[in-house]
Structures are given as structure tokens and as C-alpha cells.
Image (cartoon, rainbow, N blue to C red):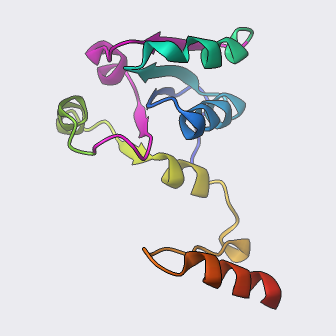
Amino acid sequence: MISLKGKKVTVMGLKRSGLSAVHLLLKEGASVVGTDTDPSLRLEARAFDNLPVKFKLGKHDETDFFSSDMIVISPGISAVHPILASAKKREIPVIGELELGSSFLDPRKTYAITGTNRKCTTTELLGEMF
């Protein structure tokens, strides 16, 4: 498990999973900025009105990234995005939402199913086995 208390974290991409990442980061004591190029996400952001998070919608502002201790990206964000490339050059860690979430799981109780085909079948089989 990684320690997030007091860390400045930028979440890039705020659809469903991005908002879940924001919830986890806040729960773990991080200072969070959520950013997305889609300005229509204002309604979703209102669910956080009473929480200590800043949302920047409509465009990405480099200063939000370069002042962060860590950047969390949604699956729909390209890992070669120019802002992320600049952040990596500045040695700011960039991780995906799955990496963030999985760092809080007990590895003794975690099973991962990956690949492009037959995940549903494999998941059903494991469910029956357990």
C-alpha cells in the first residue's frame, strides 16, 4: 500500500473510474486536482461539492501536473500524452487507476484475470471454484 496522506495528486480523466480514483485518493488523505477536457462533467463534479477537491474541466493545465507528487491516469488517456511525457521527464510518477486501486488490495486475497479473450468464462469458472 502506498502512502498518500498529504500528497498532491492530479487525476487525469474523470469519467466513472476517474471519479472513483478521486474518492480513493481523498479517503487516503491526498490533496486532489481532477482534470478532464470534457466540460460537460460539471454535473458529476457537483457530487464532490463538500469535499476538498478541485476540478478543472474543459482543458488540462500543465501547472496542475507539474506541481503534483503523482499523476493518476484513466484507461482512456494515452500514456504518451505530451503533458505526461513532460511530467515523466520531471520524474513525477505517472500511474494508472488500476495500479492505484490494486495497491490497496491484499495480494493474498487478490486474483487478476487479464487478456483479450475468455475473461468472462475464466471469471465464472473461478467463481464456481471459490
Q: Residue furthest bottom?
A: 129
Which residue is pictured at 25% across the width and 38% down the height? 91
Please determine whether, in this image, residue 75 is positioned above or below residue 126.
Answer: above
Which residue is pictured at 17% across the width and 32% down the height? 82
Q: Quarter of the image for the C terminus: give it.
A: bottom right
* Residue 1 appears in view: no
- The image quadrant that residue 58 belongs to is top left
Please determine whether, in this image, residue 61 is positioned above or below residue 106.
Answer: above
Q: Position of residue 84 (x, y in %)?
A: 25, 35
Q: Position of residue 124 (x, y in %)?
A: 72, 81
Q: Does the magenta portion include 43?
A: no
Q: Nearer the viewer, residue 14 or 43?
A: 43
- The image quadrant that residue 72 belongs to is top left
Which residue is pictured at 75% across the width and 9% down the height? 50
Q: Nearer the viewer, residue 39 or 75?
A: 39
* Residue 37 appears in view: yes
Please determine whether, in this image, residue 36 is positioned above or below residue 70.
Answer: above
Q: Nearer the viewer, residue 32 or 116?
A: 116
Q: Does the magenta portion include 63?
A: yes
Q: How many marks?
A: 0
Please determine whether, in this image, residue 44 is positioned above or below residue 14.
Answer: above
Q: Position of residue 128 (x, y in %)?
A: 81, 87
Which residue is pictured at 53% across the width and 18% down the height? 41
Provide the residue span drawn in magenta. Answer: 51-78
Q: Is residue 45 left or right of residue 39?
A: right
